């Protein structure tokens, strides 16, 4: 999640379409777009070319 919006990073390339900046206490990616989904990677999520998921 970035700016209160979820992004679908499925199949996306880290460093090209998004970044996970090293911030240990934050969650970069989850397995599904909800706060209770399992964490895939820690860090600060920064979308580079991904667009937000529509509600």
Image (cartoon, rainbow, N blue to C red):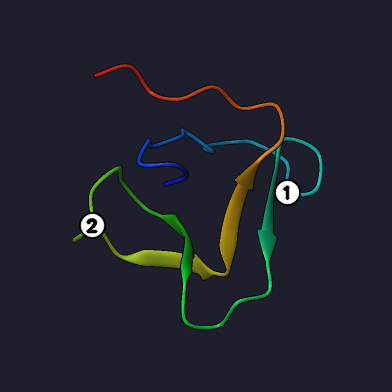
Residue 33: which disc?
none
In the picture shown, does residue 15 fall above or below 11? below
Decide if residue 48 is on the left or right side of residue 2.
right
Secondary-structure class at tag 2 = loop
Q: Secondary structure at mark 1?
A: loop
Above or below: residue 26 compared with residue 11 = below
Where residue 48 sits, quadrant-wise, is top right
* Vertical arrangement, residue 28 with respect to residue 49, above or below: below
| Residue that lies at the very extreme toward the left in this rendered image | 36
Q: Are marks 2 and 1 in contact (CB under 8 Å)?
A: no
Q: Residue furthest front?
A: 3
Q: Residue at x 46, y 34 (%)?
A: 7
Instruction: Return the residue nearer the eye: 26 or 32.
Output: 26
Residue 1, placed above or below residue 6: below
Across and down, in percent, residue 21 comes to 69, 65
Q: Residue furthest bottom?
A: 24
Q: Residue furthest top?
A: 54
- How far apart marks 2 and 1 lie (CA) works out to 21 Å
Total label count? 2
Label 2 sits on residue:
35
Residue 35, position as x, y percentages in the image:
23, 57
- Who's the residue at 57% across and 63% down the image? 44
Q: Residues within 10 Å of mark 1 (few under 14, many from 20)?
A: few
Q: Tell which tag, 2 or 1, sits nearer the viewer.
A: 2
| Residue 51, image x, y percentages | 54, 22
Identify the residue at image location x=42%, y=47%. 1
Closer to the N terminus: mark 2 or mark 1?
1
Q: Pick whichever, 55 or 39, lies toward us.
A: 55
Instruction: Kindly identify the residue that appears in the image at 73 percent across and 48 percent down.
Output: 14
In the rendered image, the quadrant that contains the C terminus is top left
Q: Mark 1 — residue?
A: 14
The 10 Å Cα crowd at callout 2, few under 14, some 14 to 19, many 20 or more, is few
């Amino acid at each position: 999640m970035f700016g209160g919006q979820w992004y679908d990073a499925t199949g996306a390339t880290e460093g090209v379409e998004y970044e996970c900046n090293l911030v240990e206490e934050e969650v970069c990616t989850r397995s599904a777009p909800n706060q209770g989904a399992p964490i895939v990677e820690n860090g600060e999520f920064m979308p580079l070319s991904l667009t937000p998921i529509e509600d």
